[in-house]
Image (spheres, rainbow, N blue to C red):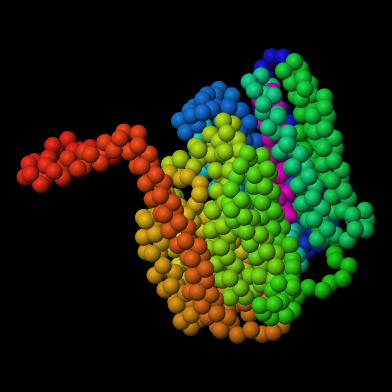
Amino acid sequence: MKARRSLPVYTVFVVVAGIIGVIVSTVFLAQSLAALGIPDPGPATTAGLPFFRAAGLMLACLGVGNYLLAAFFIHPQERTELPTTRLTVDGAIAVRSGSWAMLAWALIAAFMIPLYLSDVSGEPLTKTLQPAMWPVAIDQVSTSLAFEWVAIFAFITGAAGLVVRRWLPTPFLLVGAILTIVPLGLEGHSATGGNHDYGTNSYLWHLLFLVLWVGGLMALVAHARRRGPELDLAVKRFSPMALVAIIAMAASGLINAGIRLHFMDWFTSGYGLVLVGKTVLILVCGVLGYLHRERTMPYLKEKPELFTRIAVVEVIVMAVITGLAVSLGRTPPPPPRTVDINSMDILIGYRLEIPTTFWNVWTMWRFDLMFGTIAIVLAAIYLWNVRKHSYWPWQRTMWYMIGCAMLLLTMCSGIGMYIPASFSMHMVGHMILSMGVPVFWVLGGPLTLIKETHKGEDIEYIIDALVNCRLMKVIMHPGFNTVQFVVVYYILYVTPLYEYLVWEHAGHLGMNVVFILSGTFYYWQLIGVDEHPHGHKPMNNLWWLMISLPFHMYFGIYLMQLGDVMAFDFYNALQLPWNPDLLWDQRVGGGIAWAAGQFPLIIVFGALLWRWFTEDKKEQAEYEERAIINDDADLRAYNEYLEQMHRGEVPDAEYFNKEIKK
């Protein structure tokens, strides 16, 4: 099997997805225009929009897959020296291919801005392409705004990737490529109407596993066609991820469909039939994946062409799935059988009928598809590694499980349900996510557990490289870390940012992610078990903690004394049945912000003092052990120094320059 170029195959994949998107969208074109009540904007829009959106999504998959291959599927030149090692030839080719795919995705995303304005307004594309219409599109059309962010993320990622020659930036390129699909997951059918929190979260999971699955297989096809080394290793690492991806895609797709469709509508409406076709094709891909495991993986070294043939067919099926997925965005779902929707359904996705009390927040439950899933997955990964570890302190397991349970209970109980509807409950959630969950997580030492469980394996070197990279050195510096943790409060609540974010589910998702990340970095540096670039210095960390306290206290006082209600229009638009006093609720939130910090402070102070005590005992034991070994040489030298001082002699200058070994 000779090496072959992959551009023709890539082109086929992209074009197939685009053509399927056009065909299915054209079938339902008249129905879509009638539902929207707008004129036909012309074939440039009606055919161009589904084609380029499907093609762009395949390019996003291609970028993600190639970065994934270079970062985690194949080895760089020196697997034990990841911070400085260069990519292999095949790794560099994969990064370059992914970067060009990202730049093409950025170009398509920019073109989608006027395309969507043409689509929703009925104006021809030639008119919406005019420069004066672009700001109108971004301001008035949510999908155009989403594609603006896609274009920005994709351009930055692609441009950065073209200059990468070492391994270390590749995981960050992968993160950047995945970020390009996030804006798309936050708009469309899933982000509107009742249960849109479920719709948005399930669609985000769906897109994530789509790009990992499709992109990973596309990258493997290219790697096999150019006869790249370690194909067997790359396929072995991709296989379990593909299994998880197909299960997650099927589950998230069914949840997303179940929100908008009655079961009978699956077989009696055009929207439902497209969904059925998409689901069947996902199952077909699962069968092809099984064939890979049974028929091609055992013979990868002897017959790599067999893997390539089945993989190409599988990617073509995936391209059809992508085209169908895009066409769903242009196919009107059937109307609900009973129309019963109010302002709460529209703004937060569900209804709240009773006011918050200490008791009812624990009797109301609604599983959070985003953070509830994350809590369960993190707990499962941790426990799996504990099981493989020869000995792991039970206290650390307990701390980490408490953190996961706290995240699960907070976001899936009445607390999580009331977070978007009440400022006081929002502040409860903020405090738990930034000061509660992270404290217990970092005391569990998850990175240390993974490294010790997989000693000498690639994942150990990957963790060490990422933890000690320059970016982490900046983030984990005590000064920077303290500032970022404090500044989050003031940027969010003192500026108009909070009032802007609360209107969208995406805003609440973003705030919660920032709270968790900010708190995790902050408490990792203060009391975390895992190593970080600046080491553990208990007394220094205690001082940094004391410096941050006044800023937290002042922030709570500021909220309690504020005379205007933040996000008044949003809270008023919810029309909560019990008609809460919004100013009083806000002041309660300020009191919570002022008082809630005391709980984690007790744990933080205790952890710092305990670490100081144990390190002091450890240092003392080391000195005593050394004294036994060298027969108290350090003590005798010190006594001799004192005798010289007593006799009025000048001590040997060598003593002053002597460093006691630890």
Nearest the camera: 534 or 570?
534
The boundaries of the magenta stretch are 201-224
- Quadrant assignment, res 65: top right
Nearest the camera: 589 or 624?
624
Q: Is residue 260 magenta?
A: no
Nearest the camera: 508 or 159?
508
Measured along the vertical axis of the image, is residue 492 above or below residue 118? below
Query: Whole-percent x and y of residue 658?
Result: 23, 37
Identity of the residue drawn at 13% across and 37% down: 652
> Split into 4 quadrants, where in the image is the C terminus?
top left
Identity of the residue drawn at 79% across and 39% down: 320
Query: Whole-percent x and y of residue 498?
Result: 54, 68
Nearest the camera: 599 or 290?
599
Dominant secondary structure of the magenta stretch?
A: helix
Query: Whole-percent x and y of residue 444?
Result: 57, 51
Identity of the residue drawn at 45% across and 77% down: 557
Q: Is residue 11 visible?
A: no
> Split into 4 quadrants, where in the image is the N terminus?
top right
Q: How many marks?
A: 0
